[in-house]
Image: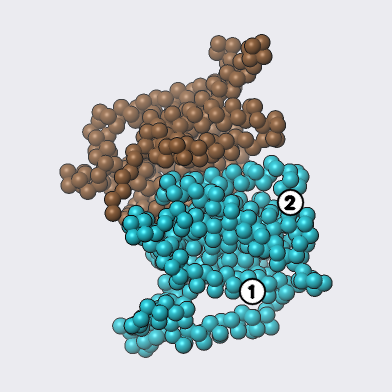
Chain colours: A brown, B cyan
Amino acid sequence: MRFLLDELPFFLELLVSGLLIGMMYALVALGFVLIYKASQAINFAQGEFVMFGGFVVAASMRYHGLSLVLSLALGFGAMVVIGLLMERLVLRPLTGRGVIAIIMATIGLASILKGLLLLIWGPLSVNIPLPIREEPVEIFTLLVKLVAVVGAIISLVFLAGFSFLFLRSRLGIALRAVADNQTVAQLMGIDVRHYFALTWVTAGVVATIGGVMWGNMIGADVHTALIGLKVFPVVILGGLTSVPGAVLGGLIVGAVENLAAGYIDPFVGGGTKDFVPYILMILALMVRPYGFFGEQVIERV
Amino acid sequence: MVNRECGVFFSTYAADMRLFPLPLTRWTMVGIAGLGFVVFPLVASDYFLNIANLVCIAAVGAIGLNLLVGYTGQISVGHGAFIAAGAYAGALVVTRAGLPFWIALPFGGLMAAVVGAFFGIPSLRIKGLYLAIATLAAQFIIEWLIIHIEWISGGAESTVTVPKAAIGPWVLDTLLEQYFLNLIVLSLAIVFAMNLVRSPIGRAFIAIRDRDVAAEVIGVNLFRYKLLAFAVSSFYAGVTGILYALYLGAANYEQFDIATSIDFLAMIIIGGLGSILGSVFGAFFITVLPMALRVAVDGAVTAALFLFPAANISHVVQSMTAVKLILFGGLIIVFLIVEPEGLNKLWRNIKDYFRVWPYSY
């Protein structure tokens, strides 16, 4: 009992910081889920979106001396353009082709984005200065990084905003219609392509926000793209088509990987963080092949 | 590998399924084999022999992946991990047990097949994207296991040094000898794959690819054939891994990371899904691309230095990786959009063009 009490602060600290990180995973996963929901396209470049959006902001501030607001605008602008180009030049010609084709096309895009970043700005890691205090703050005797809290709050605002948008606005109803049945949506006079483009743009924008938070915490460079690999366990756990699922998945992955890293890393010498979410995911797939909130697909011949 | 010619039809199943549908194809094969085994070794320098070795090794793995993705329609983003499994299994058999390489080759392949079949189990319940991500998990899990289990990786560097292949006292240590080894293995791989895809097993694979529910309805045992596809594909991957280890002199997990898996996927996309010849084309293309790029950049740099001796070109060399990444991604996308059947289709177009030359359709 005594031992458990001693362990409690450590456990809680790991749990809380994991959950905060998890909120940001959820934000990045949101872009993935939106794209998949609307067009059944799988974005293997989501991590590269985070990397590129974040780096455009970082480079604008550090290399070109722009203000934070202007840099953010530039970052969003760049991702909007990339999202639109991707939809128009790559996905539209690939409409109706198999899963493999779309996965490979986004892998190709990922490679191009990485190459562009290296070509334009080089491999150096750049930190994004945010007007947020660096020192950790104390909340209920737990030390937490302020930027992580702010990131989690921004993620929450966005996720809540999207949920509201989905349920209430005209745009959200159209998006849900497109996700539900493309042909019928088209017959109802919805420009399906317009909404596909919109989801790609949204994915780019939320990725940029994630990229800026990440860039502030650990610096922006090519390796930021590795976040994309965390998105897969998140969306699989939550079910590919569900926004609340993405949040739940993000929280679970964030908490579990942080706890696992805290308790297992000392014994095996690191690397647990990258590995545990996937174990968790495989286990989840065995129990619920379509995630916690995903739609079960019924196949007919 | 040998495509059906247009306008050639058969009246019996046996004739339709023959390995060489026309006498001409048999002679073509003899010609290609002659080029590969006799002419090329006679004329090639060490530089080209090295390229040929790498192409042969990559081609084995690409054929394996194509059997799984192109023929059976199961996506795998974990091919690199299965290559690693084979490489380490083979390397350990050679170094710890002191067995010769010709036992290590099938042993590593079998180990990889077991690992691959294990990670193929989720394919029974999930497909498409979910399967792709599950195989991605295989990539991370295997990589982590190799690094963290010291019995496998043999210490901090996670590198197992492998002696060169040897038959009795004869050590295959020149590029030429290794070329023959790799080419023989590749030939066996091609023949096996060609025969596999025209057998009942191959037809079951194709039926699963085209519509797995329908395949099950007509009596294809999905459990068996999906796992078999994963096992065969991983066997090829394992053999590739050992060939790499023998050729490069070491097994190291860093060579077989997720980028390797993506490289192999790119090979079969660019070469042509569901085509064995295409896999070889793709392996050639993806292996030679960075080398060709390097030659081109070196040439450009030399020319630039000749014209402007004072120019600072260090950033040009630095941006090589970047250009390679962009070109690589761009090519995948262009091939997907413009020529979804890959290089194999281009080759067929050329053949069809000359078949009726000079009269076009």
**Element type at marker 1?**
helix
Q: Amino acid at mark 1?
A: Ile
- Indicate the quadrant where residue B156 lies: top right
Q: Nearer the viewer, residue A204 or A182?
A: A182
How many other residues sit within 10 Å of disc 2, few (<14), some (14-19) or many (≥20)?
some
- Indicate the quadrant where residue A9 lies: top right
Residue at 62% from the left image edge and 62% from the top image edge:
B240
Question: Is residue B223 toward the left or the right of residue A182 in the image?
Answer: right
Residue at 58% from the left image edge and 15% from the top image edge:
A142
* Vertical placement of residue B183 versus B92, above or below: below
Q: Nearer the viewer, residue B348 or A156?
A: B348
* Vertical placement of residue A80 versus B241, above or below: above
Which residue matches tag 1? Answer: B184
Residue at 69% from the left image edge and 41% from the top image edge:
B148
Q: Amino acid at mark 2?
A: Thr
Q: Are marks 1 and 2 in contact (CB under 8 Å)?
A: no
Question: Mark number for residue B259?
Answer: none
| Same chain check for tags 1 and 2 | yes
Q: Nearer the viewer, residue A27 or A150?
A: A27
- Give the x, y percent position of residue B230: 51, 56
**Residue at the farthest left position:** A188
**Dot placed on the residue nearer the N-terminal end, 1 or 2:** 2
Q: Is residue B310 visible?
A: no
Chain designation of label 1: B
Q: Is residue B190 visible?
A: yes
- Give the x, y percent position of residue B166: 77, 69
Question: Is residue B167 toward the left or the right of residue A131 in the image?
Answer: right
Which residue matches tag 2? Answer: B159
**Residue at the farthest right position:** B169
